[in-house]
Amino acid sequence: MDLQREFFPRVRKTVMPRPYFAEETDVLGQSGSAWAVDAAIYGPNWTLDRDQGLIEIYGAGAAISFYHLLPRKNKYEKEGLYLRLRLAYRTTENANVNIRTFSGNHVTLPNSVAGHMYDDPENYWWVTDDLTLNINSIYTGEKLWLQRVDWEWTSQEVVYADEVPDQEAYLERSPDEVSQLYGASAITEDSVKQFLVQKIQSDEAFAKRCLALLTQEQLLQKDLTEIFQYSRSEG
């Protein structure tokens, strides 16, 4: 079927919010709190109560960004530390609020009239780049109040819950041990081989050159006629 092309003399432009680029911040310390009233809030169905230090949520759609209030998630990656995040909130009796958490998962927060700390266990495995909470759904007529996000740099070394009475819950570290992690590593045969393997895996053009070098010796063993015929067949 031949499609008929029409002419539209006047078409609507797309209207969208101007992009907002948050400033990079270097949040210092081993732990701290980011207050919800200082977050960047987008979308509908929320009000801000600065007197009580709370964001009141009464419907779905809001996105609460803590990007400029929290440390960068990979700041201490070399040291085996991850950014543990806990959310302080309270709800009405039957709110059943579903959110996208800092780990990117969608969970329904336990209802808590008195207040609760949600400690997302999935932060051990992943922290989102945008450091943003999204309100997916909330029961009609119910409310959620967000107060703060507590953060702490935590070791990825695991102690199981049943081992806590017999195991040390804190990892002792020395300045020398940590400084060595950031020092220039020695160049050895193994490190060079590892570099080449990683380069081949990540760079297809480099991998092709390596294959060309491997086949070069085979081609040099042939006479000029055979090499010429091979080049014509490949071309």
Image (tube, rainbow, N blue to C red):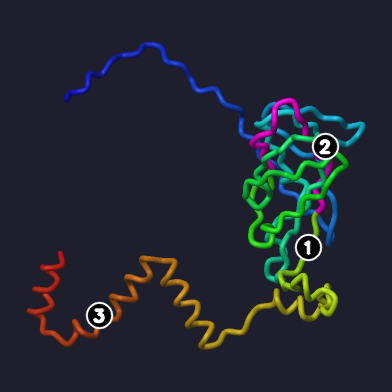
Q: Position of residue 84 (x, y in %)?
A: 75, 58
Mark 3 vs mark 1: which is more N-terminal?
1
- Neighbor class of circle 2 (other Cα within 10 Å; few <14, some 14-19, many 20+) is many
Residue pointed to by mark 3: 215
Quadrant in the rendering for residue 234: bottom left
User: Mark 3 near mark 1, Cβ–Cβ under 8 Å?
Assistant: no
The amino acid type of the residue labelled 1 equals Trp
Residue pointed to by mark 2: 37
Quadrant in the rendering for residue 22: top right
Report the quarter where the C terminus lies.
Answer: bottom left
> Which residue occupies 70% across, 76% down?
181
Q: Which residues are magenta?
A: 133-150
- Give me the C-alpha separation between circle 2 and circle 1: 23 Å
Q: Which mark is residue 153?
A: 1
Mark 2 vs mark 3: which is more N-terminal?
2
Q: Is residue 85 magenta?
A: no
- Neighbor class of circle 1 (other Cα within 10 Å; few <14, some 14-19, many 20+) is some
Q: Position of residue 188 (x, y in %)?
A: 55, 87
Name the front one of labels 2 and 3. 2
The answer to which of 211 and 113 lies nearer the viewer is 113
> Which residue occupies 24% across, 85% down?
217
The answer to which of 145 and 81 lies nearer the viewer is 145
